[in-house]
Every structure is written in C-alpha cells, then in structure tokens.
Amino acid sequence: MLWVIPILLKYLIESGADINIQDQDNNTPLILAAIEGNIKIVNLLLKKGANTDIKNTQMNTALHYASINGNIPLGLASCCGHHVIVRMLLKKCTTPDWCRVREYFIFLYVISEGYIEVFKALLEHEPNLCNAKVEEERATALMLALASENIELVKILLQYNPDLNIQTTTGETALHLAVELGNLEIVEMLVRKGANIYITNKDGISPLLYARCNNLKVMQILLKYGRTLD
C-alpha cells in the first residue's frame, strides 16, 4: 500500500492530496495507519493536520484502533494530546516499547506541540526521557523545549536533572542555544543547574564567548553564576 511510504505520503500531501480522504469503508489514511500500527505514518499524518475524530463505517476512529493495537496506543494518544488517555494507558504498561531510545521521536513530538500534561505524564512514568535525543543531530529534549521558548517545559525538564552538557553533532549544548536566544531567565536556570559556560562547539565558541560578543546581560549572568559554581 502506497501510504506506508513516508516520503511518498509527504509528497502527496504537499502536492494537495486530501489528507482525510476516505475509502469505501470510510477509513482515512490515519485510521489505516492506526490499524497497521505504523507509528511513523501516524506521526506524519498528525503533523500534517489529519482529523482524529473521523469515524469509519464501523463508527470507529483512529484512536479506537490504536487502543486495541498493542504497538501504538500510547504513541497515538500522546501525539493527539490526550493526557487522560495517556495516564490510563501508562498504568497498564511498565516499559512501553516507544519509550526506548529508537522511539524517542514521540516524546520529542509532544515537546514540539507543547502538550504540557502529556509531557508531565510521560516524564513521571519514564524519567530517563529527560535525556531523549534526536538521533541525527543529537539535539536533546531540553534543546527542543528551549527552541520552542516554552519556559514551563524547560522548568519541568530541569526538575529531572537532565545532562545539561550533552553536545549536538556540531558541538552545541543547551546553554549555547539559550544564550543565542537571549532568554535571561532560562540562561540563569541552566547555569544554576550546572551548565558549563566554557564548553566549546566545533567552531571553538563557548556560551561565554558568544554572550561576550552578542549580549552583555547574558554574559553577566554567566560570569556571576558560572564562576560561583566553579
């Protein structure tokens, strides 16, 4: 079936294909993906705005099929922002498959969408998710939260003591990003938690050097709290 091919599916959607088109049984692409347990396709369709409320001829939605398919119920509920369902499902499983390293993209998607309550539920159940990384770039959950400038997400993550000095493939840390964004509150939170102000990226630039060249107020915070911690 063509819809199992992510690249082709993305091309069709971007070319104007109806993302909620229904077959003879009123199944949408999202319902079919849920039936098959294909979380990558589910994720792509949700990102593109697929309707989760459409019912087929059996009066079932995609979420219904996800709930009876052991592969993706938690992932789909998370991507839809249904925190009540997420908490209910978490009570029934000890270590969900998608909470493992190769499936971190679900947690990262929750961050990008700003689903606070789902975010809390997942972290409470699996604290190690605080160090989840995007494999290609090694960007962390904290970096994605910073990029979204969602201070509440950042504060919640910091409660779980993530590794603040993890570097991306280009050598940036969460503090590099925070300094670049210039958010004084976040910079102070990171440094107080132990973020290294001297660690350099592949261009030899540290958070302190970047601040020195671009933001005097940020530099003052780095020197005040960074030196105290040293």
Image: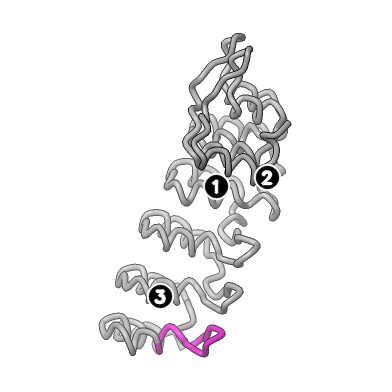
Crowding at mark 3 (Cα within 10 Å: few <14, some 14-19, many 20+): some
Snapshot quadrant of residue 21: top right
Q: Residue at x 66, y 31 (%)?
A: 92
Q: Which residue is mark 1?
A: 124
Q: Residue at x 63, y 52 (%)?
A: 104
Q: Cβ–Cβ below 8 Å for labels 1 and 3?
A: no
Using the image as rendered, state which of residue 13 and residue 167 is in the foreground. Answer: 13
Left or right position of 35 against 178:
right
Residue holding disc 2 = 98
Binning the other alpha carbons within 10 Å of mark 2 as few (below 14), some (14 to 19) or many (20 upward) gives some
Q: Which residue is mark 3?
A: 192
Please provide percent x and percent y for residue 135. Answer: 65, 62
Of the residues shown, which amino acid type is indicated by label 2? Trp
Count numbered badges in the picture. 3
Q: CA distance from mark 1 to mark 3?
A: 23 Å
Q: Which quarter of the image is occupied by the N terminus?
A: top right
The magenta segment: 198-209
Label 2 close to label 1 by CB (< 8 Å)? no
Which residue: 58% across, 25% down? 63
- Which residue is painted at 59% across and 55% down in the image? 129
Give the mark nearer the N terminus: 2 vs 3.
2
- The answer to whether residue 50 is magenta is no
**Quadrant of the image occupied by residue 186:** bottom left
